[in-house]
Image: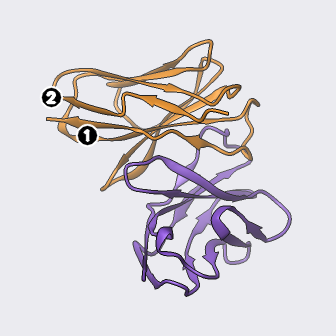
Chain colours: A purple, B orange
Amino acid sequence: AQSVAQPEDQVNVAEGNPLTVKCTYSVSGNPYLFWYVQYPNRGLQFLLKYITGDNLVKGSYGFEAEFNKSQTSFHLKKPSALVSDSALYFCAVRDINTNAGKSTFGDGTTLTVKP
Amino acid sequence: KAGVTQTPRYLIKTRGQQVTLSCSPISGHRSVSWYQQTPGQGLQFLFEYFSETQRNKGNFPGRFSGRQFSNSRSEMNVSTLELGDSALYLCASSTTRDRAPTDTQYFGPGTRLTVL
């Protein structure tokens, strides 16, 4: 069985400050990890994914995520937050036994960036 | 390349009615999945189809059903609607390949269903 936890319902940061949105996971084998962003009344937009290789993954809109196997974490980061980054962020996981069409999602973290 | 499209975008129904939602995947994608998103339950997996075959089904009652056509377009149906079925229903398409857990899912804008 696989699961994802996003321990923070809400993250607030000031514009220009670095941001981190946390994600921890549990899978039976090697994890495949994804981050998505959702703006109001919109579907989910893909940001980045970790499959294998370099633990630091770079994605869209200046976001990056760091895979940490020992801590089973995949935190989303951005060096300098923008007000337009305010949205709902989802972490998702699959393992080798999961089809591409099925992901397990966290409950989401609402990021608010204040000017 | 066109993205995932879902129709209709908004729908209002009353309890006891049935509803059919449609999803057209990205051209060439053969995998289509459906998710239900509600404020209380988050994103919950409904079904996954690949080449007209249901691969997986989430923990939903039999009132929720789906199918996929030969052109990969998919429909989901909910019969005997209940108030709790009010949600954003998201469709995602991914991959031309079977059983490819590394492939990315791309989501449509969703259908907002309101049950009165």
For residue A22, side relative to residue A88 (left or right):
right
Asked if residue A6 is positioned above or below residue A30 in the image, the reply reads below
Horizontal and vertical percent position of residue A7: 47, 74
Chain where mark 1 sits: B
- Residue nearest the viewer, comparing B95 with B79: B95
- Residue nearest the viewer, comparing A83 with A96: A83
Q: Which residue is mark 1?
A: B86
* Mark sitting earlier along the chain (1/2): 2
For residue B97, side relative to residue A44 (left or right):
right
Horizontal and vertical percent position of residue A98: 67, 43
Q: Residue at x 31, y 55 (%)?
A: B39
For residue B86, side relative to residue A103 (left or right):
left
Q: CA distance from mark 1 to mark 2?
A: 10 Å
Horizontal and vertical percent position of residue B8: 36, 28
Q: Quadrant of residue B50?
A: top right
Q: Residue at x 54, y 62 (%)?
A: A4
Secondary structure type for disc 2: loop
Q: Amino acid at mark 1?
A: Ser
Q: Residue at x 68, y 45 (%)?
A: B104
Asked if residue B105 is positioned above or below residue A82 in the image, the reply reads above
Neighbor class of circle 1 (other Cα within 10 Å; few <14, some 14-19, many 20+) is: some
Q: Quadrant of residue B30?
A: top right
> Do tag 1 and tag 2 residues touch (Cβ < 8 Å)?
no
Chain where mark 2 sits: B
For residue A47, side relative to residue A108 (left or right):
right
Q: Which residue is mark 2?
A: B15
Q: Quadrant of the C terminus of chain A?
A: bottom left
